[in-house]
Image: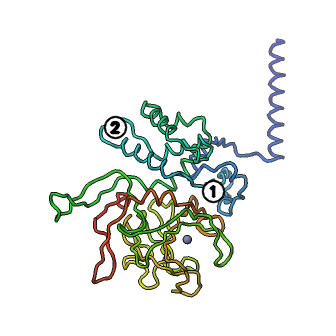
Amino acid sequence: MIIIIRFRKLLTIAAIAVCIIILLNIIFGAKPSVVTSSKALQTNLTTPITPLATTAATPPTAATQKTSESPGSPSPAPQKYIKWVDFRIPQAAMEKAINVDIKSHAPDSKVQISWIEVLSYLAAKYYGNMSSYKSKDMDQVVATLNNGETIQTLSKGYKLFDYYFEAYSSVLSGLVGEYSTEYVDKAAPNTKLWKKTYGLKAFSPFGSGYYYGHFDDFGTSRSFGYKRKHLGHDMMGSVGTPIVAIESGTVEALGWNPYGGWRIGIRTLDNKRSYYYAHLRKTHPYHANIQIGSTVRAGDVIGYLGMTGYSTKEGSNNVKKPHLHVGMQLVFNEVQKEGINQIWIDLYDIINLLQKHRSQVKLDPITKDFNRVYGFVDPQMLD
Ligand SMILES: [Zn+2]
């Protein structure tokens, strides 16, 4: 009997407690009972990784502040994306990592190694300071991977790995891969044959046989318009030198720009970056195939070196020394394409890396345009 009475008392207390909780919820407003783990949120983001420092320093943009207004549904997390990249991988490190990657793609290789993962691991290990790069550190990583360890387990202790992998992928993911190209066999010099290759598929912007001089001038001071930093790479050469597309992509900008003169902007097929080729020739700046929206293949002739720019007047030849200005802009979110939050990177080491991969070009005496000599198929264009 006593037990039954106590049980009833307990039930009454529980009922009162539930009523109080409901009442408090009505007064203060109940939150939707949707539990969203940080892992689930991450998978919903297109570009989930942002370095801590820049996340804190950069206010959310109008685009990232948009939330769902529908009643009862949880607000989506603000979209996170990388806001800053300081790209400084020495040419030697890139070259070595590419060779490891290519070797691991041979038919008899048991383990496939991504050069971008290897470099991202090293960057995370050096806390981003790639000037600490040592060849033997890369040997160690590669040996561990070849022994069956995965990059995921290897990089577990390095918080910056995901950031560097995303940042480096946005710069480098189009440089190495599969492609098909024409070539001439010595045994049959009059016949072109096709071969499928895995390797460096991006081209130096200077056609084969054309000289250029350059140094690392990214970030140096410029004064036309206003005092600013040089956000590209200058390659000194002769007026009329055929300029080729470094990577395949779609022409997204064409025409006069007060800084760049006659210029071409090409967005890569994965949309992650844009190349900017500027100061093209006053007369005949572009190849006839180049129009807004047209697709170009890596190594196609796109235009000709000149000295246009530094004027609002179209066609002005105000650049002192003929050169190509080439830039690479990273786009993690479309809001970064224009305005003050653009990310441009130093191309010096990449241009050095591409020095050995040049597109052979030939003048067509009828059209007066240069064209590539050897056919090239980029599988990315067939997707
Ligand atoms: Zn420049």
x, y (%) of residue 253?
Answer: 50, 74
> SS class of the residue under badge 1?
loop
Read off the residue under disc 2: 109
Read off the residue under disc 1: 84
Q: Earlier in the sequence, mark 1 or mark 2?
A: 1
Q: Nearer the viewer, residue 219 or 336?
A: 219
Q: Classify residue 140 as left or right of residue 180.
A: right
Quarter that holds the N terminus: top right
Q: Classify residue 24 as left or right of residue 81.
A: right
Callout 1 amino acid: Trp
* In the rendered image, the vertical position of residue 67 relative to residue 109, given as above or below: below
Give how far apart the Cα atoms at labels 1 and 2 are. Answer: 36 Å
Badge 2, how many Cα within 10 Å: few under 14, some, many 20+?
few
Callout 2 amino acid: Ser
Q: Classify residue 186 as left or right of residue 26.
A: left
Q: Nearer the viewer, residue 76 or 306?
A: 306
x, y (%) of residue 174?
Answer: 44, 56
